[in-house]
Image: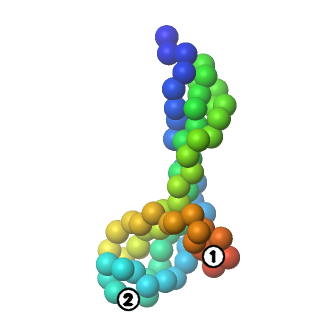
Amino acid sequence: VFLFGNKNYGEHLGYIVTNCPACRIDRIFSIDQRRQKFTVYFIPTVQYRVKQYMTCQSCGEHFEIADDLKTQIAERLM
């Protein structure tokens, strides 16, 4: 029986239109957030990591969003 561990949670936040570094053209990006929580007896107790990713809907490349850009991205979400 495992007493502790971690679990990943994901949620879709929305879409933005911006220039893709891979395509070099303005594209639609999907914005997703992934959170990792420490669990005790399968009950999430402490969140210890939050990352946001943007995925180009055209070429499929995904990029991690830097912490200082998260508020700017949140303001532009559709």
Question: Residue drawn at (55%, 16%), measured in percent from left and top?
Answer: 3
* Image quadrant assignment for residue 11: bottom right
- Point out residue 55 in the picture as x, y percentages from the top left corner: 43, 68
The numbered mark, 2 or 1, whose residue comes first in the sequence reads: 2
Q: Which residue is mark 1?
A: 72
For the question of whether residue 55 can be seen, the reply is: yes
Q: From the viewer's perspective, is residue 29 above or below residue 23?
A: above
To which residue does mark 2 refer? 25
Q: Amino acid at mark 1?
A: Gln
Foreground pick, 78 / 71: 71
Instruction: Name the secondary structure under disc 1.
Output: helix
The residue located at (63%, 76%) in the rendering is 72
Mark 2 residue type: Ile
Image quadrant in which you'd find residue 26: bottom left
Q: Is residue 72 left or right of residue 24?
A: right
Q: Name, please, the residue furthest toward the front.
A: 68
Q: Residue at x 49, y 83 (%)?
A: 18
Q: Residues within 10 Å of mark 2 (few under 14, many from 20)?
A: few
- Residue 56 position in % (x across, y down): 41, 73
Looking at the image, is mark 2 or mark 1 nearer the viewer? 1
Q: CA distance from mark 2 to mark 1?
A: 20 Å
Where is residue 42 drawn, in percent x and y? Answer: 59, 24
Is residue 74 at all visible to an observer of this figure?
A: no
